[in-house]
């Protein structure tokens, strides 16, 4: 009986006539609204008595909405400061073509009657058959009553959602898809502003409507003589988040000075240096995620200490000691990046000597990786060697950097699965190996390990130990006074490979 009653009420809504013209203004909940009969534009604003989190357009039942089935409404603009739009607010407005929601919107489609029937819980635009454009400027999809998205597409919208263009920020796509908006024709909101810079305009910048500035390019950003040269200078007060993309090796001097509201910055694995006063007046910059695989050099006052505030710098766990040992970086609180230990542990990747002149480097599969960049560096700086391979184990690029005083080259490398044997190295020398897994645009995960190629004498000892270990596996072992001993070629060794006399 309850279900039949609900269907009856819903049927009544479908044929509800517009018995009176919409007034020119009014108030609903803690929102004010005005209507222009000439243009058909309805504007909803937050009232003076709205709570601190924003105006609430409270509706207990769509039938009680002053806007329901008003054919004179052509466009709805919900202005900044409004946080909630109640259930079925603009239901059955047959000529409504466009609705714009603000960045402050966090709740939509709920009834203010906590015991309301399912039938009265509707999206604000249910049955708006002429609707063609929805604009959401909120960073995340607004919270919606769970009962709404349990319905079929026809019950949910009352029109074909494919015909409606849903404009959202690129960073918000996942949130809206997970919230059930995938049935619409999803389009990208244009950024607040964008442009290019550099000597040859080789760098791009884009500022989202949520205050995120993204810098894209390869190589060293140019140093600036003044913060007023920043191409984004007029927006500095609106920028809250900074992303410097993978491939950028140097952040130019004064690039982000006077970012007075910047709270978080993401720096790439490729970063090698930061110019003078690059973050000179960032008094709110508390969190920095630095994925660099070498400690970036810092210019004068590149990241100054701020009184009464800590800057937290998150780095790969294996880089923490190096950052703490650096005079410029250790002024700040160095923390470990909160990443999956399954993807980022030194145990997962390894470098093992194979002979006096070769190392075997291995690492795990990385989901989403398109290629791997393996960098080998000698401890004394005599060799820097970089090889890039794709997931088909094919060499994409090869670069060797070495001072003129040492002309030794890496003779060859062998790729086997996710293992790389590097030959032609110098005997008895310590090497650091970094493996960076990347997709098309960014670093997914990084590993860093180290190893020393063995000398000839060490190799002989290692071979003997290997043989002892092999004998141990074959059962040629005994226990003496509680100690494991291994017999090999008429001699006795302990478990560490040392001869016992």
Image (cartoon, rainbow, N blue to C red):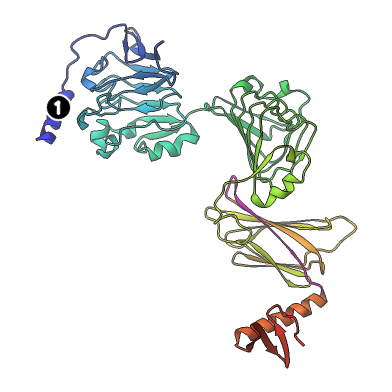
Q: Is residue 189 left or right of residue 232?
A: left
| Residue 333 in the image, given as x and y percentages of width and height | 68, 39
> Badge 1, how many Cα within 10 Å: few under 14, some, many 20+?
some
Q: Is residue 319 magenta?
A: no
Q: Residue furthest right?
A: 405
Q: Residue furthest left?
A: 1
Q: Quadrant of the N terminus?
A: top left
Q: Is residue 440 magenta?
A: yes
Instruction: Say if 275 sits above or below 400 in the image.
Output: above
- At a point 12% along the width and 34% down the height, the residue shown is 2
Q: Residue furthest bottom?
A: 490
Report the residue marked by disc 1. 9
| Residue 213 in the image, given as x and y percentages of width and height | 60, 30
| Residue 481 in the image, given as x and y percentages of width and height | 66, 85
Q: Is residue 100 left or right of residue 73?
A: right
| Residue 159 in the image, given as x and y percentages of width and height | 26, 30
Q: Which residues are magenta?
A: 439-455
């Amino acid at each position: 009986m309850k279900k039949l009653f609900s269907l009856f009420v819903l049927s009544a809504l479908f044929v509800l006539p517009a018995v009176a013209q919409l007034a020119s203004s009014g108030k609903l909940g803690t929102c004010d609204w005005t209507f222009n009969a000439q243009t058909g534009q309805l504007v909803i604003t937050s009232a003076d008595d709205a709570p601190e989190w924003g105006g609430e357009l409270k509706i207990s039942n769509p039938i009680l909405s002053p806007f329901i089935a008003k054919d004179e409404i052509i466009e709805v603009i919900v202005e900044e400061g409004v946080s909630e739009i109640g259930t079925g607010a603009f239901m059955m407005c047959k000529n409504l073509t466009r609705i714009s929601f603000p960045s402050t919107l966090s709740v939509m489609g709920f009834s203010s009657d906590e015991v309301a029937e399912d039938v009265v819980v509707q999206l604000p635009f249910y049955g708006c058959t002429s609707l063609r454009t929805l604009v959401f400027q909120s960073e995340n999809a607004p919270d919606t009553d769970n009962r709404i998205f349990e319905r079929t597409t026809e019950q949910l919208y009352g029109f074909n959602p494919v015909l409606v263009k849903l404009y959202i920020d690129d960073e918000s796509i996942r949130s809206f898809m997970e919230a059930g908006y995938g049935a619409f024709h999803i389009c990208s909101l244009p950024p607040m502003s964008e442009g290019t810079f550099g000597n040859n305009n080789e760098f791009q910048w884009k500022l989202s409507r949520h205050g995120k500035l993204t810098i894209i390019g390869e190589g060293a950003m140019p140093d600036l003589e003044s913060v007023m040269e920043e191409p984004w200078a007029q927006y500095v007060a609106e920028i809250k988040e900074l992303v410097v993309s993978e491939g950028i090796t140097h952040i130019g001097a004064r690039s982000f000075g006077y970012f007075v509201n910047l709270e978080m910055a993401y720096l790439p694995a490729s970063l090698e240096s930061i110019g003078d006063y690059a973050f000179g007046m960032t008094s709110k910059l508390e969190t920095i995620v630095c994925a660099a695989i070498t400690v970036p050099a810092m210019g004068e006052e590149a990241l100054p200490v701020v009184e009464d505030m800590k800057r937290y710098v998150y780095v790969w766990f294996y880089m923490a000691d190096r950052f703490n040992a650096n005079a410029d970086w250790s002024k700040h609180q160095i923390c470990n990046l909160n990443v999956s230990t399954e993807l980022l542990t030194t145990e997962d990747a390894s470098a093992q000597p194979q002979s006096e002149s070769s190392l075997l480097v291995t690492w795990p599969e990385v989901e989403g990786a398109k290629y791997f960049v393996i960098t080998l560096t000698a401890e004394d700086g005599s060799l820097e060697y970089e090889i890039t391979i794709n997931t088909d184990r094919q060499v994409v690029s090869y670069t060797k950097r070495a001072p003129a005083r040492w002309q030794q080259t890496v003779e060859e490398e062998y790729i086997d699965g996710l293992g790389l044997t590097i030959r032609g190295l110098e005997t008895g020398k310590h090497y650091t190996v970094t493996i960076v897994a990347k997709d098309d645009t960014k670093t997914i995960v990084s590993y860093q390990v180290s190893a020393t190629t063995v000398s000839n004498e060490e190799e002989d000892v290692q071979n003997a130990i290997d043989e002892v270990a092999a004998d141990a596996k074959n059962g040629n072992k005994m226990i003496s006074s509680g100690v494991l001993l291994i017999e090999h070629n008429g001699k006795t060794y302990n478990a560490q490979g040392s001869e016992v006399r």
